Amino acid sequence: MDILWFGVFAVLLLGYFALEGFDIGLGMLLPVLGRTQEGRDRVVAAMAPYVLANEVWLVAVAGVLFGAYPRAEGEVLFGLYPLVVSLLVSWIVRDAGLWFRRRLDGRAWRAGWDGAICLGSFGLAFSWGAALVALASGMSITPLGLAGGVAVAAALAFHGWTFVSWRLPGRVTGARRSGTALLVSACVAAAPAAALLAGAAPWLLGHTAPTDTLNVLSLMILPFAPVMIGGQVWVWRTFGPGRAPERTPSFF
Amino acid sequence: MDVLDLARTQFAVTGSLHFLFVVLTLGLAPLVAIMQTVGTFRGRPDMMRMARFWGQIYVINYALGIATGLVMEFQFGLSWSGLSHYAGDVFGAPLAIETLGAFFLESTFLGLWIFGWHRLSPRLHLACIWIVTLTAYASAFWIMVANAFLQNPAGAADRGDHLELVDPGALLANPMLVMALPHVIGASLLTGGFVVMGASAYRLFRRTSEQRFFTASLRFGVVVAAVGAVVTVAFGFAQFGPVGEFQPGKFDDAPLAGAGLGFMIMIGELLQLFVLFFLLPVIHWLPRWRWVHPLVMLATPLPFLAAILGWLAREVGRQPWLIYGKLTVADAMSPGLTSGMVTTSLIAFTAVLGLLAVTDYILIARTVRRGPAAVSLGAAPTGPDPAPERAAALSL
C-alpha cells in the first residue's frame, strides 16, 4: 500500500511538471512569442483550455502529501517557508492574469494582466527551482537555488515553446513540433523533480501514514481514478491541434 | 501581536476571504446547471442565455475561490505543522480525498465547461457543469468532515504523541458535521439566490434592457433564496444540540464567538422573514414593484456577512483548542515560526488577495451592468465558417 501511494504521489508531481510546465513556460515567453496584443492573445488562447486541468495536479500533490505523508507535509512546507509563500503569490498572480485579462476591454488592461502572467510564471519557475535545490540539499535555502531557478525556468520555457509549436504549428514560433517532441519536452520539464524524487524516496516512504489511513484514502479515491484520467484525456482530445482556426475569442 | 496571534489572523483573513467566494460558487453552480438543463432539454434559448450570463458571474467569482483556496491548503503546512504532526493520520485523509476525489475533477471539468461551448455536444457539455456542481458539493462535504473533526475529534484514538484513525465511519457521522453541512449548503443557496435577485433588481430598477430576462431571473432567485433560507435557519438551530453536548459554553466563554452568533442569527432571521413572508408571496408582482428593488439590492451583501459571522462563531468559540480537547492552537503552531515570517506572508497574501478580491467584485458588478448581450462565456462563433456540416450540428 505504501508503494502504491508513493506511485500516486510521483505520478502527480511529475504530471504537474509535464503538464503545468508548458503553461508556466509559455507565460514566461509571453512577451517574446507575442510581441503584439494579437500575438499574446493567440499564445494565451493556445494554453487556456488546459490550464485548469493542469494546475490542479499541484493541488493534488499537496493533498496526497497531507493525507499519505502527514509528518513530511509540515516539515517540507515549513522548511521551505519563503519559497512556498513566493510560489503561492506567483501562482495567484499568474492565475489572476489569465482570468482577468479579457474581462475588460482596453489594451492597457490586457497588457497589464499579460505582464502579471509573465511575472507570475517567472516567480513559479524560480520558486520551484530554488525549492528543488533546497530539498535536495536538506532544506537549506542557499544562493545556489538561483541556479536551480534558471535551470527549471529554461526547461519549462523549452516545454512551453514545444507545446505551442505543436498546438499551433508554424503560427507562433514558426516551428512545427510533433507529439513525440512534446513528450520529450515534457520529460525534460519533469526531469529535475524526478531526480529529486528518486533521491528522496526512502525518506518519504519512511514518513508514510499508517495502513489504516492509506486504506481509507484508497477506498475513497481509487474509484474516482478512471474519471480523473478520463477527464484529463477528454481535455486533450477536445482541444488538440489540427482543428480549424478559432472563430470565438478565447475566454482567457 | 505575538506570532500566534499573527498566524491566527492570517488564517482568519484568508479563510474568510476564501469562504466569501466559495459560498457564492456553491450557491450559483446548481442554478447555472439547472438553467442549462432546461435550456438543453426543452430547447429554450432564453434559458441558455441565462446559463451563460449567470455562468459568467459564477466563473469570475470562481477565480478568487481558487486563489484563496490555494493559500488555505498550503497554510496548514506553513503555520500549523503541529496539526499534521499530531493529527495528520486522521485530519489529512479528508483533505486528501477532497483534493483528489473532488477538486481535481471540479477543476478539470470546469475547464471543459468554460472552453467547451460549441465544441462539445450539448449533452456532454451539460454533463460537465453537473460534474462541476456535484464535485463542488463533494468538496464542501470533505472540508466540513475535516472541520467537524477539529470541533469534535470523533473516530480517532489518542496514541500519546499522535492521533490514530480507528473508526472512519465515526469521522463521517460526526454530530458536528451532520447538522452543519446542510446549514452551509442552505447558506450557499441563500447567497446564490440573493445575488441573482440583487443583480436582477438592479437591472429592473434601472429600467435597462432585457426586462424579460431579469424578470425571470428575479423570480428564480426568490425561489432559491426561500429554499436556502428555510434550510439554513432550520439546520442552524439544529446545531445547538450537538454544540451544547460537545462544546458546552462555546458562545459564553468567547465574546467574539457569542457576538458573531448573535448577529448571524439576527441577519438570518431577518432575511428569512423578508424572503418567505414578503418576497415569495408577491413573487408575481415583484418584478414590476420598483420600490422593492432597492431593498433587495441593499440586502444582497447580508448573506455574505452572515456567513463570515457564522464561521467566526464556529471557529473562535473553539479557542484555545485547534482540535477540541486534544491539541491547542499554540501547540499546533509550526515550531520555529517567527513574527517576521508571518508578518511578511500576511502582508503579501492580504495585499494580493485583497486587491484581487476587490477587482473581482468590480468585474462581477460590471458584468451585471453590461447585461447578457455582452457576455463572452459561450459566445456563438463568428466569422467565416470553414466547416458547414459542423455548424449544422451546432444549430440544434
Image (cartoon, rainbow, N blue to C red):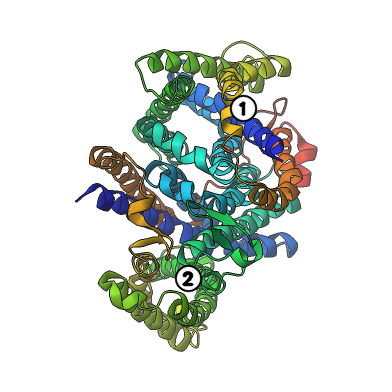
Which is more foreground, mark 2 or mark 1?
1
In the orientation shown, which residue stands out farthest toward the right? B389
In the orientation shown, which residue stands out farthest toward the top? A175
Q: Which mark is residue A184?
A: none
Q: Which mark is residue B187?
A: 2
Q: Chain of mark 1?
A: A
In the orientation shown, which residue stands out farthest toward the left? B1
> Which residue: 55% across, 14% down?
A158
Q: How many marks?
A: 2
Mark 2 and mark 1: span between their CA atoms?
Answer: 39 Å
Query: Is residue A101 in view from this perspective?
Result: no
- Residue A104 location, x and y as percent? 40, 42
Q: In the drawing, does residue B93 fall left or right of residue B387?
A: left
- Residue A176 location, x and y as percent? 66, 13
> Which residue: 44% across, 82% down?
B272
- Residue A72 location, x and y as percent? 51, 37
Q: Secondary structure at mark 2?
A: helix
Asked if the residue at tag 1 contacts the one at tag 2, i.e. Cβ–Cβ closer than 8 Å, the answer is: no
Q: Nearer the viewer, residue B276 or B310?
A: B310
Q: In the drawing, does residue A55 fall left or right of residue B61?
A: right
Query: Is residue A162 in view from this perspective?
Result: yes
Kind of residue sitting beneath label 2: Ala
Q: Chain of mark 2?
A: B
Q: Residues within 10 Å of mark 2 (few under 14, many from 20)?
A: many
According to the picture, the residue beneath numbered tag 1 turns out to be A14
Q: Residues within 10 Å of mark 1 (few under 14, many from 20)?
A: many
Q: Secondary structure at mark 1?
A: helix
Q: Is residue A222 above or below residue B253?
A: above
Q: In the drawing, does residue B394 fall left or right of residue A39?
A: right
> Which residue: 51% across, 21% down?
A25
